[in-house]
Image (cartoon, helix red, strand yellow):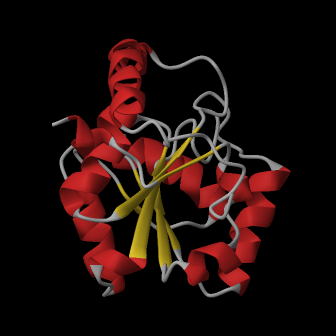
Amino acid sequence: MIAKFKPTWMVDTVYNISPTQLKEHGIKAVLSDLDNTLIAWNNPNGTPELRKWMADLHQAGIPLIVVSNNSAKRVSKVVRNLNLPFVSRSLKPLSFGITTARKRLGLKKSEVVMVGDQLMTDMLAANTAGVRSILVKPLINTDKWDTQINRFFEKFVMKDLQKKYPNMKWQEDLND
């Protein structure tokens, strides 16, 4: 059961994931959580690093789709500034949102990766959907109240994962 939470990779930040590395792994599209993955949950404008990373993906022909549990109203307000497509109310940890985004792109499971900052939602949803995943560290150390509950349980899940998979470690990038 613990394997359902295991990320394919653990990378410090989404900004370290290069289009070249993605292509080397056969990845043609990135699906990403929104809050504390692409943007700080309390700062919807994003950062210059995010905009550069998005431009690099775009230049490489790798689409980026936000897959969020938030409402369409909340997600659209944020991604409008970033000009990103999205799937809202994705029902993570279920696979619904990931599968919807992947099918929208017409890609195989092996051709997409889900990026997120939570084991309990993002990584479980990716594994349930049968796609590879990248766990990133949260952009900031504070969370909305509902995410704080997941973070509490996540500590125990991470401890069990590291016990079962001793080689699982944080990397600088996908090739580290």
Q: In which quarter of the image is the C terminus?
A: bottom right
Identify the residue at horizontal 57%, vertical 36% (top origin): 36
Q: Position of residue 33 (x, y in %)?
A: 46, 48
Toward which corner of the image does residue 111 lie, by quadrant?
Answer: bottom left
Q: Where is residue 29 in the image (x, y as percent from the top left)?
A: 48, 76
Q: Does residue 142 appear to the left or right of 154 in the view shown? A: right
In the image, is 12 to the left or to the right of 147?
right
Q: Is 116 in front, or is 63? A: 116
Q: Nearer the viewer, residue 168 or 66?
A: 168
46 in relation to 158, above or below: below
Quadrant of the rendering where the N terminus is positioned:
top left
Q: Which of 5 and 145 is in front in this view?
A: 5
Tell me: 122 left or right of 94.
right
**Residue in the picture at 66% in, 57% down:** 81
* Residue lying at 51% horizontally and 46% vertically, measured from the top left: 34
Position of 170 relative to 105 (above/below): above
Horizontally, residue 3 falls left or right of residue 82, namely: left
Q: Is residue 152 visible?
A: yes
Question: Residue 150 is drawn in which quadrant?
Answer: top left
Q: Which percent across, then down, holds residue 142?
A: 59, 17
